Image (tube, coloured by chain):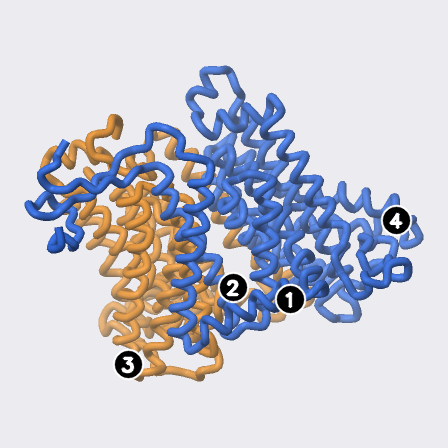
Chain colours: A blue, B orange
Amino acid sequence: MTETTTPQTGPQAGSFRIKLEPRLQEPPRWYPVAVSLGAIFIALILGGIVIAFAGGDPFLSYAHIARASFGNLGVISDTLVKATPILMTALACSIAFRMKLWNIGAEGQFIMGAFGASAVVLAPLLSAETPAWIFIPVMMVAGMLAGALWGFIPGYLKAKFNVNEIISTLMLNYISISWMNFWIFGVWSEGGFQMSPRFPRTAWLPRLLDYAETFPILRGLTTHAGLLIGIAAAFVLWLLIYRSRWGYEIRLIGDNPSAARYAGIDISRNTILVMMVSGALAGLGGMSEITGVVHRLQTSPVAAGYGFTGIIVAWLAKLHPGVIVVVSVLFGALILAGREIQPSGVPKMIQGIILVCLIASDFLLRYRIRIIRAGSEE
Amino acid sequence: MDFIIILQAGVATGTVLLFATIGEIFSERAGVLNLGVEGMMLIGAMSAFSTTIATGNPWLGLLVAMFAAGLISQVHAFITITLHADQVVSGLALTFLGTGISLVLGEGLSKAGTVSLLPNLSIPLLSQIPLLGPIFFARQSILVYIGYLMIPLAWYYINRTRPGLHLRAVGEYPSAADALGINVFRMRYFYVFVGGMLAGLAGATISLAVAPGWFSELTTAGQGWIAIGLVIFAQWDPVRAAVGSYAFGALRRLILDIQGPLTLLGFDNPFYYNPYWGFFLQMLPYAFTVIVLVIGSREAIRKRLGAPAALGNPYIRGERGL
């Protein structure tokens, strides 16, 4: 059989052909993980080719990413800081995607969450002397409400007028940026600069470095309580989706909407609710970023594309909240390290290539590839 | 503020949306939803600009843009047509991919200086028509005139020719088309490629004519998504797409120009005296897209018009259903 090495799809004699068969049973548990890892590996190779084409050194770039994100305790902490907003936007996307609602608006909901939380300080709804134990919860609620409102609009339009939620959520992303800019540039501008005044210390989420006096090892570590909030949110979401009646309804609508309709599940109501929960989660992310890292309202650190990275993370984690926690740390590393790489678009491009490869690899989960030698036709 | 000048510039701006929208109409008519328009436009804008800088020939830039965007559209075609993956997710991925690649390859292009642009020209007799002449036929980029030609041609092709009939059949009832001997897979690959080429042309129209230069993601600023919204508003019809595109183009120009003058219709211009009110103006195209979607969706329900029946579904031979 030494001559039959050229793969051909046609049924010529002397060769073999490739036949695709839908998988009838579930593949073993390790198989999807292996396929995803393979897809990421291929994505990194493809990304390296483009980097080389643009005049960079792919090996240096990747080595730099690894070193600059996990090299020592300080950068690991920074990686976790970057992972926190991604974690929340990915959770936001995951619940909407679970129902096959394509909420691409986590970015805008994140921004509105940051705005809502800032309004508590800047409007001001609470005076600067308010103790932290009141301040932080009120800001959390405000951020989630603002995000939920920004999720409600496309949810309502989808349920009521069948408006494509992909486009409406995207348009709301652009609108939210203009809305935030209006407040930053105009109303809340600090002395004409394009940022709001700094929040009082009581409106900051506690950070590891706050405890450096008791534990000197924590000096300079900026990981903040938002990470804990995010992990708690992941756990609650897991309970909600896999252990509650409502979660079952969401999954049923996503998998088989007509069956859900026959079962008497109100799809319109769930569309609106899921979009609101999704928006609230993204809004919580915006609140955590603004109170844990930025400590003021400012465009570039808030509208940094976390909402879009969340889409990829949610997809890579197959929408599972627990896996999302792990994957968002990896993407936090990519974004953290990517700031220093040239050309500067590399992290964005690698994210895109990873997503493309992941989607393509899904094929291997749904179909079996059989190679049939000529003459052994079934 | 001269409304003639605003409308004239609006037609040029609208040409970008026109190309992208008609491209997406071709792709969706064949049954493939491609949400990657924004990414393909960025690829087109970047490659047109960089090719023109390297060679000094904007026509070559245009060709490279169309080919590059068409090429990247085939990633989507392969994933959705051959691998049967979800068209929504794949299209999103294509936008990320196109954005990322154009950012990497376009690094430094924003400081590259100016290029020789595509020529502007006036049509001798037509530009003398009062009102319409100066708006549509005077000192417009040659791409604007290509846009005018494309509207009736696309309409005629889709509705009155045999290949157009096949195109519609593939999008409405692929298994019947297959039974008639039309190669559904090849047709879909081809029209996704056409959609990609036109998105690339739209991108090149920005970087070589309407707003020359490369400004990373801000080059397109979401126009690819607006185009996808316009397809729904246009009910997959090139003529309605043209109306929507030019209206949006005029709106974009109006927003840019309304903040300049001291007085507006005899009153103090509020946008001049409160410059950050301009942020609300910037929201308008996006808000209008949502409104247009609401109108389009309601009309579609009322008239029982709709998307091509097989839009979004992979065609798998021998499977039940469309």
Alpha-carbon distance for marks 1 and 2? 18 Å
1 or 2: tag closer to the N-terminus: 1
Give the amino acid type for the residue marked by disc 3 in the picture: Asn
Alpha-carbon distance for marks 1 and 4? 34 Å
Q: Residues within 10 Å of mark 3 (few under 14, many from 20)?
A: some
Give the amino acid type for the residue marked by disc 1 in the picture: Gly
Kindly report which numbered mark, 1 or 2, lies closer to the viewer in this rendering. 1
Work out whether residue B112 or residue A124 is closer to the camera in this orientation and state it: B112
4 or 2: tag closer to the N-terminus: 4
Kindly report which numbered mark, 1 or 4, lies closer to the viewer in this rendering. 1
Where disc 2 sits, the SS reads helix
- Disc sitting over residue A347 in the figure: 2
Alpha-carbon distance for marks 4 and 2? 36 Å
- Disc sitting over residue B57 in the figure: 3
Question: What residue does disc 4 label?
Answer: A132
Residue A166: % across, % down:
47, 44
Q: Quadrant of the rendered structure where residue A174 is?
A: bottom right
Residue at the image position 27 percent from the left and 51 percent from the top: B192
Query: Are discs 1 and 2 less than 8 Å apart at CB?
Result: no
Question: What residue does disc 1 label?
Answer: A71
Alpha-carbon distance for marks 3 and 4? 62 Å
> Which chain does the numbered disc 2 sit on?
A
Kindly report which numbered mark, 4 or 2, lies closer to the viewer in this rendering. 2
Give the amino acid type for the residue marked by disc 2 in the picture: Pro
Kindly report which numbered mark, 3 or 1, lies closer to the viewer in this rendering. 1
Where disc 1 sits, the SS reads loop
> Which chain does the numbered disc 3 sit on?
B
Instruction: Please determine whether, in this image, residue B250 is positioned above or below residue A277.
Output: below
